[in-house]
Image (spheres, coloured by chain):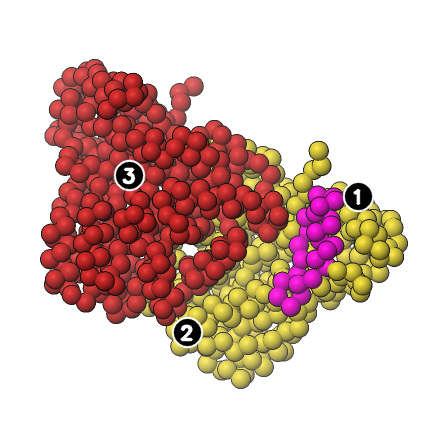
Chain colours: A red, B yellow
Amino acid sequence: MPKYRLLTPGPVAVPERVLLAMAQTVLNHRAPAFLPLLEEVRAGLRQVFQTGREVLLLASSGTGAMEAAVVNVLEPGSRAVVVRGGKFGERWGELCETYGVLPEYVDVEWGRAVEPAAVRAAFERAPDARALLVQASETSTGTYHPVRELCELTHEQPGRLILVDGISGVGVHDLPMDAWGIDVLVSGSQKSWLLPPGLAFVALSEAAEAAMRACERPRYYLDLRRELDSQVGNQTAWTPAVSLIVGLREALRIILDDGLEKVLARHRALAEATRAAMRALGLELLAPDSPSFACTAVRVPAGVDGKALLQHLRDRYDVTLAGGQGHLAGKIFRVGHMGDVDAFDMVTAVSAIEMGLADLGWPVKAGEGVRAAQESLRGWLAGGA
Amino acid sequence: MPKYRLLTPGPVAVPERVLLAMAQTVLNHRAPAFLPLLEEVRAGLRQVFQTGREVLLLASSGTGAMEAAVVNVLEPGSRAVVVRGGKFGERWGELCETYGVLPEYVDVEWGRAVEPAAVRAAFERAPDARALLVQASETSTGTYHPVRELCELTHEQPGRLILVDGISGVGVHDLPMDAWGIDVLVSGSQKSWLLPPGLAFVALSEAAEAAMRACERPRYYLDLRRELDSQVGNQTAWTPAVSLIVGLREALRIILDDGLEKVLARHRALAEATRAAMRALGLELLAPDSPSFACTAVRVPAGVDGKALLQHLRDRYDVTLAGGQGHLAGKIFRVGHMGDVDAFDMVTAVSAIEMGLADLGWPVKAGEGVRAAQESLRGWLAGGA
């Protein structure tokens, strides 16, 4: 009876409390009982987004919310600077190109954070660009981009907006929307939110809302004017994903009972322990300089077949990690730090990696990774570091 | 400890088996264990859609799937005949207008089925129209439109397509997609599918697929080319709503173990019993001539406040029915026949309506509705009628 262990950067393991909440009798979304539920969820989302603005709920994957950001806020024919340092940076670019927004790309080596100077140079090349599109955490490479600096830089010129894909960033990294001046912030349920996929979130600053109201591009299902006007009246524009919203209430209670600060510290600590373990094993991190706390991306060592390694971990040990995407397929593996995972789940991940590499004939220093992870985790659990 | 009874035409009551399936540990959608699950679901969907074509899964509400139909299949600037006999007919029209499809409306009194002759006349007024958009079951009025005749009429001229909103039609009415030549058929999880909202379905005929491949309108999240190309490889384009898909497997097992024919007969029988009961009470049906089996719409009798009636049923008896939408708000109530509801749930609905009307001072013939419902249901449960 092996236990199935899901350690990918989304979908994530969902706590039993949330699973059971979602198994409750389905409510009608127009019923009075749904109103306090939606109100609690809206208030909780604002806390995690660190904003006084409304956080809109969409029945979609995170990509739907990214599309909503583009089609509601950016006019066709307008220009935007797009940071492209991974699969999700490419997705911002594809969305712009699909919908007639002209991207000025800042291409970044996968695994590196964008240099603010490179974004500044792009704005100089495209002085009419009205927006910057970037990931907070680029899930495909496990890299964190310097959102705070990018907000400042974007706002050096009035009227410019910064759209941040926080799908694996919100609730993982400190991204105070209002304090930093993030104009559009997007997230998705299957990440830090302790939920299955199917629900996405997007919040707009006052300036982004003005741009949305002025934007004439046709849109309907993802029309955020309609969602915002409904949600301030404590409704949703379309039939919402009721069971996921019931789960979200429970998840938000878990997150806010713990406190956002502790939740962010947990992601950081799990990521740090994993990085320490990988280094102790002599493995190379893909993003050593600016790692995301959502997941840790590790280069598969020379001589090991990356796809075979992941399959082996799954088949023999029932441990599911993620592989690489795009040109990194087979070349990296990624350990997720979001969802219902704790210190010992990271120990388990490291242990499985050690055993798997040994099984595949790589000269692993058995126990060294686990030792390093433990050392790192002990400090955190003792209340230090 | 009153029981909460959800008798609206979506969201619907979800069977315990499905709720518990969704409470299982969340799978990663790229994991091998997800592959047979998705394959089973795809096969089951094809059976209920009565098609050999692929039924695409979207993480969205039904409106998202309606939008997908319009933006993938109908070119901007093209013309389409749109049947508008309720809120969802209006939605087809709004989608067309939003996306530059020029609608030739066939306006139908709410509660009446469209006359095929009126559609023929519209095609004559707009001979360049390439499509007909219609509901199978118009949920807002409880009306069934004659889909079979409309398919024949549409296909009298080669190259024309019929797009059918089967959100509350598929799995409720017999809508054999391939046999009748439905070109685009849409449905949504919170209806006959025994699921919470958040998942939508759309299938395309060969001709609709060709139109989709030729259509150059920009689209991304709802790009059905991408979904179809992914799904024939047993994947989804974006992160799917995994927990709802796990629930869908269980729901499809329930539906297909019963057999589609019996499932359709159940909806019909529950609707017939409800209509018989309402007539016995002297209440007027909104759609007497062509009733949908998804829900029965009943006019609130003169002197009774429709909104007060529904609120009273909810507050005193914990029975949730639906009201009217648009200009019918307060003027009708609707009893749903989809989801985890059986004969005695209909008896309960009728009983609550009788008690509620009496409470509000209407001279109800107490027991007459229940008696008529029982008589109708007995025939069905005895295997007759």
Residue in the picture at 25% in, 19% down: A379
- The residue range painted magenta reads B306-330
Neighbour tally class for label 2: few under 14, some 14-19, many 20 plus, Cα within 10 Å: some
Image coordinates of residue B249 in percent, x first then y, are 51, 40
Of discs 3 and 2, which sits in the foreground? 3
Residue in the picture at 22% in, 18% down: A375
Name the element at disc 2.
loop
Magenta includes B326? yes
Residue in the picture at 49% in, 35% down: A250
Image-based side of A155 in relation to B183, left or right: left
* Residue B382 numbered tag: 1
| Chain containing the residue with disc 2 | B
Name the element at disc 3.
loop
| Chain containing the residue with disc 1 | B
Report whether residue B295 is seen. no
State the residue position of label 2: B100
Task: Name the residue nearer the viewer: A379 or B20.
Answer: A379
Neighbour tally class for label 1: few under 14, some 14-19, many 20 plus, Cα within 10 Å: few
